[in-house]
Amino acid sequence: MMKLNLLSCDALRLDRRAISKCIAEISNNMNESFSNELTTILLEADVVAVKMEDKNAGFALRALRN
């Protein structure tokens, strides 16, 4: 199991829906409602911790780069 700490999002044009979708895709068993809540927390400049399986690490890191 791998834990990511998401510290901030400094995109010029924030797309809340895309951020929420990305969080849901990289995490273990997270529903859309919870990923929306975590997106709000992240955009308010608080740290968000996301757990994911090691086998998904490569995919998750590529998704976060975009």
Image (cartoon, rainbow, N blue to C red):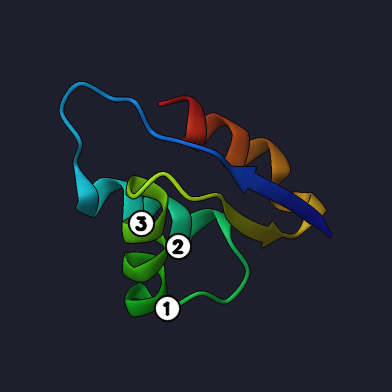
Compare residues 47 and 55 and report the one nearer the observer.
47
For marks 3 and 2, give the one nearer the viewer.
3
For the N terminus, the quadrant is bottom right
For marks 3 and 1, give the one nearer the viewer.
3
Q: Residue at x 81, y 52 (%)?
A: 54
For the residues labelled 2 and 1, say whether their Cβ atoms are less than 8 Å apart: yes
User: Along the horizontal axis of the image, is 3 left or right of 9?
Assistant: right
Which amino acid type is shown beneath numbered disc 1? Asn
Residue hosting label 2: 24
Q: Say the numbered circle drawn on residue 31.
A: 1
**Helix, strand or loop at mark 1:** loop
For the residues labelled 3 and 1, say whether their Cβ atoms are less than 8 Å apart: no
Residue 4 drawn at (x, y percent): 68, 47
Q: Give the image quarter of residue 27.
A: bottom right
For the C terminus, the quadrant is top left
Q: Residues within 10 Å of mark 3 (few under 14, many from 20)?
A: many
Residue 45 drawn at (x, y percent): 41, 44
> In the displayed image of the protein, which residue is found farthest to the front?
45
**Helix, strand or loop at mark 2:** helix
Which amino acid type is shown beneath numbered disc 2? Ala
Q: Give the image quarter of residue 10.
A: top left
Residue 16 drawn at (x, y percent): 22, 50
Which amino acid type is shown beneath numbered disc 3? Thr
Residue hosting label 3: 39
